[in-house]
Image (cartoon, helix red, strand yellow):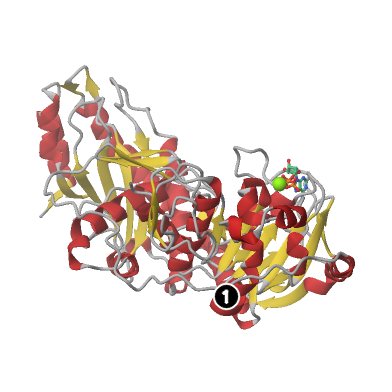
């Protein structure tokens, strides 16, 4: 039942100066002429998490032309843009109303450079715009200051809404650009598949960031320029002709001296699984969106993973076809990361020598001569990388600054020289030829078997409220159990971790009794996310700070829950 704006004002005035919990009666929906204001959850006191509020703009009022959101990519891009605008405008009003604790706070999620699906803003197929945000209901001590809240809800919010969520002709150009970029990015993703490429880096792209903690483009950076041999020309539907480096399927090695820009290129490829906003410098850096960065992760827990293609015949006789440990070593953790990424459906691995376990990556010739094969449990990645491509169609892009072992395996070798790529495949191959290698006998690859339903986690039976906490991009905690995600490097915003917390909790409380495999559980969750966002997963009460995670990160999160 919707109430009128007058009713909201009346109730507010009645509870002025009274005790804080009386704010609870505001819960409900109000018709604010032009939009609906939903007070979804009211905080318990002025120091608690702020109250959850949303605005809903009917399509006639929002009036965004249908062709700005008539496919999934454009819709996500428009939602993303509206959230940016709304959050930026709302921020100006934060703490304009006064009081104790979080009184007067107003905030929506301000996205980073990635364009992602979030609960902060959702457009329905009919064109209704929904934006969720937080409001700190004002108090003086624990006494309600409802005149202040009246200002916030009856004056500030409508101002922000009318400035950012109503379409008019003057905004045509800005929104058109967003839709066109989304369309071009979608086109590049399709083109990758058609041309058997795994990634595209446009000429002119700016890859490095301002600093290690910033996501803004570096000023005065050297712009990317593809080597001629790898250059492809795309005809984008909106931008028109765009040239850049196409990285073909197979095995690609990125070499070069220290500080010449290898890791920077790989980093750009890692986040190229997501689209970026105009002006980011990486808006035309597009990677196969199933790509997974693989690294060593000492200390992680591993549960029942078949790592036998890399590790066998352990001296303690431990079975590596169903390997578990609470404290993995560098090489076992990286082996598990590979196998789990395969289960998550990845068709491109990204590896940087800097963050890999040396003994997992290579075994050099001298070592092969001194320590006999039978005494070494590890079959290094260098001896499996080609088999992975040939038997499982998984490509690899690998940064190597110090080891030449991969020259023999690579289809393409790119050298970074003063931040510019050069195709040195032929030269490197011919030099490699001159080096005699021991032909190490590699056993045939046995692909891990994922079909058996894994009893991977205990089901949790509870109707109790769950306590979830997100610690930045590092970890989540669910009822005091911590899931460490620090080394899941393709998580780019806190909202993804908040989204993951809800997703894995749902899986663990709803799915595990049915003898479901992890793949089936994640398939089901993705179906929910696609059809109704977080509505089902959050049982109706959807907070405004969730980002839809990728399939690969859902697996990663489940796999790290001890
Ligand atoms: P590598 O992995 O080859 O050792 P990095 O990728 O870590 O090198 O880059 C070394 C430094 O150079 C970093 O500080 C990075 O920000 C900077 N850098 C990388 N690419 C560029 C570029 N295109 N223009 C200017 N500076 C760059
Ligand atoms: Mg590096």
Q: Is residue 16 left or right of residue 258?
A: left
Give the residue at x 50% y 68%.
346
The answer to whether residue 280 is seen in the rendering is no
Residue 277 lies left or right of residue 405; in this view the side is left
Q: Position of residue 262 (x, y in %)?
A: 74, 52
Q: Position of residue 428 (x, y in %)?
A: 85, 65
* Residue 30, placed above or below residue 141: below
- Which residue is pictured at 56% across the width and 51% down the height? 295
Q: Residue at x 49, y 54 (%)?
A: 314
Q: Looking at this rendering, what residue extends furthest in the bottom direction?
A: 194
**In terms of depth relative to the viewer, which is nearer, 123 or 210?**
210
Please name the residue shown 19% across and 42% down the image: 41
In the picture shown, does residue 482 fall above or below 381?
A: above
Q: Is residue 179 left or right of residue 406?
A: left
* Residue 549 image-quadrant placement: bottom left
Q: Give the labeled residue for mark 1.
A: 444
Secondary element at tag 1: loop
Q: Is residue 7 visible?
A: yes
Q: Residues within 10 Å of mark 1 (few under 14, many from 20)?
A: few
Horizontal side of 206 relative to 533 (left or right) equals right
């Amino acid at each position: 039942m919707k109430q009128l704006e007058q009713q909201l004002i009346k109730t507010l005035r009645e509870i002025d100066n009274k005790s804080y919990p009386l704010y609870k009666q505001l819960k409900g929906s109000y018709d604010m002429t032009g939009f609906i204001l939903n007070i979804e959850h009211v905080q318990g006191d002025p120091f608690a998490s702020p109250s959850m509020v949303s605005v809903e703009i009917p399509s006639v009022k929002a009036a965004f032309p249908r062709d700005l959101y008539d496919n999934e990519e454009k819709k996500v891009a428009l939602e993303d843009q509206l959230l940016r605008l709304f959050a930026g405008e709302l921020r100006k009003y934060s703490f304009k109303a006064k009081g104790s604790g979080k009184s007067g706070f107003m905030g929506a999620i301000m996205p980073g450079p990635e364009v992602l699906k979030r609960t902060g803003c959702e457009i329905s197929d009919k064109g209704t715009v929904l934006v969720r945000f937080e409001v700190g209901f004002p108090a003086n001590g624990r006494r309600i200051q409802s005149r202040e809240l009246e200002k916030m809800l009856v004056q500030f919010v409508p101002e922000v809404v009318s400035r950012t969520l109503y379409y008019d002709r003057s905004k045509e150009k800005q929104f058109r650009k967003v839709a066109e970029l989304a369309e071009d990015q979608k086109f590049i993703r399709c083109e990758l598949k058609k041309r058997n490429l795994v990634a595209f880096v446009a000429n002119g792209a700016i890859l490095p960031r301002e600093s290690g903690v910033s996501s803004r483009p570096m000023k005065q950076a050297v712009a990317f320029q593809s080597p001629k041999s790898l250059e492809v020309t795309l005809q984008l539907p909106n931008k028109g002709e765009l040239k850049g480096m196409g990285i073909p399927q197979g095995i690609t090695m990125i070499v070069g001296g220290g500080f010449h820009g290898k890791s920077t290129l790989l980093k750009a490829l890692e986040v190229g699984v997501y689209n970026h906003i105009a002006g980011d410098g990486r808006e035309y850096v597009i990677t196969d969106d199933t790509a997974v960065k693989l690294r060593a992760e000492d200390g992680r827990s591993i549960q029942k993973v078949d790592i036998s293609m890399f590790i066998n015949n352990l001296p303690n006789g431990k079975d590596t076809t169903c390997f578990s440990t609470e404290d993995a070593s560098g090489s076992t953790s990286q082996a598990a990361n590979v196998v789990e990424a395969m289960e998550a459906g990845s068709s491109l691995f990204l590896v940087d020598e800097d963050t890999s376990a040396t003994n997992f990556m290579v075994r050099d010739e001298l070592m092969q001569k001194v320590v006999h094969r039978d005494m070494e449990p590890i079959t290094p990645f260098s001896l499996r990388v080609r088999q992975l491509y040939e038997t499982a169609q998984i490509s690899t892009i690998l940064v190597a600054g110090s080891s030449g072992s991969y020259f023999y395996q690579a289809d393409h070798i790119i050298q970074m020289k003063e931040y510019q790529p050069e195709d040195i495949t032929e030269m490197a191959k011919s030099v490699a030829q001159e080096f005699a290698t021991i032909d190490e006998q590699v056993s045939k690859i046995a692909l891990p078997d994922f079909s058996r339903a894994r009893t991977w986690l205990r089901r949790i039976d509870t109707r109790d409220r769950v306590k979830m906490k997100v610690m930045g991009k590092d970890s989540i905690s669910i009822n005091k159990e911590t899931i460490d995600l620090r080394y899941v490097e393709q998580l780019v915003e806190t909202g993804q971790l908040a989204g993951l917390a809800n997703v894995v909790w749902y899986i663990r409380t709803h799915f595990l009794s049915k003898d479901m495999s992890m793949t089936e559980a994640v398939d089901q969750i993705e179906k929910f996310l696609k059809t109704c966002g977080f509505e089902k997963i959050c049982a109706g009460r959807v907070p405004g700070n969730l980002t839809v995670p990728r399939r690969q990160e859902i697996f990663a999160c489940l796999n790290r829950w001890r």
